[in-house]
Image (cartoon, helix red, strand yellow):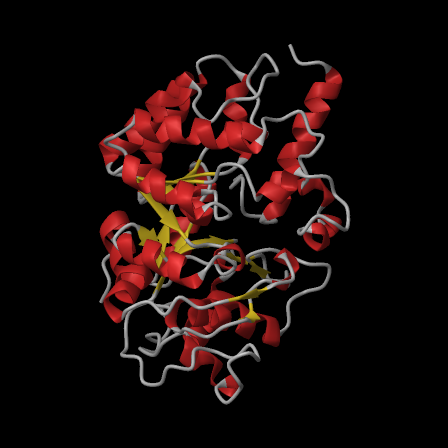
Amino acid sequence: MATRPGLARAVAILAAIAGAVGWAVLGGGGDGPAPPASSIARAVASTTDRAPDAGGPPSRPGRRSRHVVDAHVHLSLGSLPELRALMDRYGFDHVVDLSGGAGGRVLAAHLAQAAAMPGRITVFTTLAYGLAQEPGYGPRLAALVEKAHAAGAKGLKIAKALGLGMRRFDGSLVAVDDPELDVVFETAGRLGLPVAIHTADPRAFWQPVSPSNERFAELSVHPGWAFHDAPVPRFDELLAAFERRVARHPRTTFIGVHFGNDAEDPDRVDRMLRDHPNLYVDLAARIPELGRHPPARMRALLVRWHDRILYGTDLGIGPPGEPLMLGSTGATPPTDADRDLFFGATARWLETADRAFPHPTPIQGSWPIDGVDLPPEVLDDVYWKNAQRVIGLALD
């Protein structure tokens, strides 16, 4: 059995992981007006006259209307009024709630919440991480996935707790490629449920927390997110286990969230997409990293894998009264200007060739980014077509 300090550390890591998206990540437990057919950029029209380096929205006028699906959102129960307002303001047709809970009443409540906005929310189920405290947890987790699918869940979300905080009955960490969990991923594949999986975290989270760490501002607010001296696998160990997991289940569709969990190394992601035809990636909370790379390099990668990349933001909407999570959270609640920057700069990166403008999430690092100016047909794929196909969305 685990020692008492070991259990305490496991609880601390799980709490830190939960804090990364507040109330959403571990998933414990009315029909609005049609969204505007405009681009996200038009929603921040108050800044359309700003210079290209002033943090304004995409400067390309008259972009044709298209669907927008945010494939990476964390919703709390009671979040519909805030969600509806954001979808209408920023022009989203549909969101994918990755925090639907592991089943039972929690999942039922998330599905009921989605039903209150028909056609605009898809719900994923999550793993019941605590079941690993008893032997035979793999089949029992797979059975819960079966039940969640029957109840209406359209996918499975796996948090970074797998590999970093989820512990089995003997106190050891459950590895990302733990064979006991094979049945879970095979079940998801058999049921046609895509698996959105978060493995590891930004590489800087494994470096000493000091002013020289480029994520110092973020880690100062969230010290529990730092893994430099934590008894957990190193970044490259986790990514290697992630690849082994994807390779082991060729009939299961994986969505490597946060740009395949390695936005710092697009060449590695490029190679993973080539090696694993069942792997897709989303962009959630990694535009700051992606925008640092040479724009021609990133444009070529996104065009090459135009049918394997999903738009996502990592937007989090908590209980009424709680501040939004815009990819990450800071010491103070986000303002309206923060929201406009978050959505506007993301669209600007995708849609324009603007240079050296502020990225969407300042707390994630202080550097400018350069737009990749994707062709319209690639934008359609990224914004909605890939999500429609991979997740099976019924869009009007």
Residue displayed at 63% across by 60% down: 322
Which residue, as the protein is rendered here, is positioned at the far bottom?
Answer: 49
Residue displayed at 40% across by 17% down: 179
Residue 162, x across and y down, in percent: 51, 30
Is residue 170 visible in the rendered structure shown here? yes
Q: Quadrant of the C terminus?
A: bottom left
- Above or below residue 295? Residue 308 is above
Residue 249, x across and y down, in percent: 29, 27
Residue 302, x across and y down, in percent: 33, 56
Between residues 349 and 2, which one lies in front from this camera angle? 349
Is residue 70 visible in the rendered structure shown here? no
Which residue, as the protein is rendered here, is positioned at the far top?
Answer: 1
- Relative side of 111 to 199, left or right: left
- Relative side of 226 to 386, left or right: right
Residue 169, x across and y down, in percent: 57, 14
- Relative side of 12 to 99, left or right: right
- Relative side of 246 to 315, left or right: left
Between residues 263 and 137, which one lies in front from this camera angle? 263
- Above or below residue 273? Residue 140 is above
Between residues 164 and 350, which one lies in front from this camera angle? 350
Q: How many marks?
A: 0
Residue displayed at 40% across by 57% down: 298
Residue displayed at 49% across by 72% down: 355
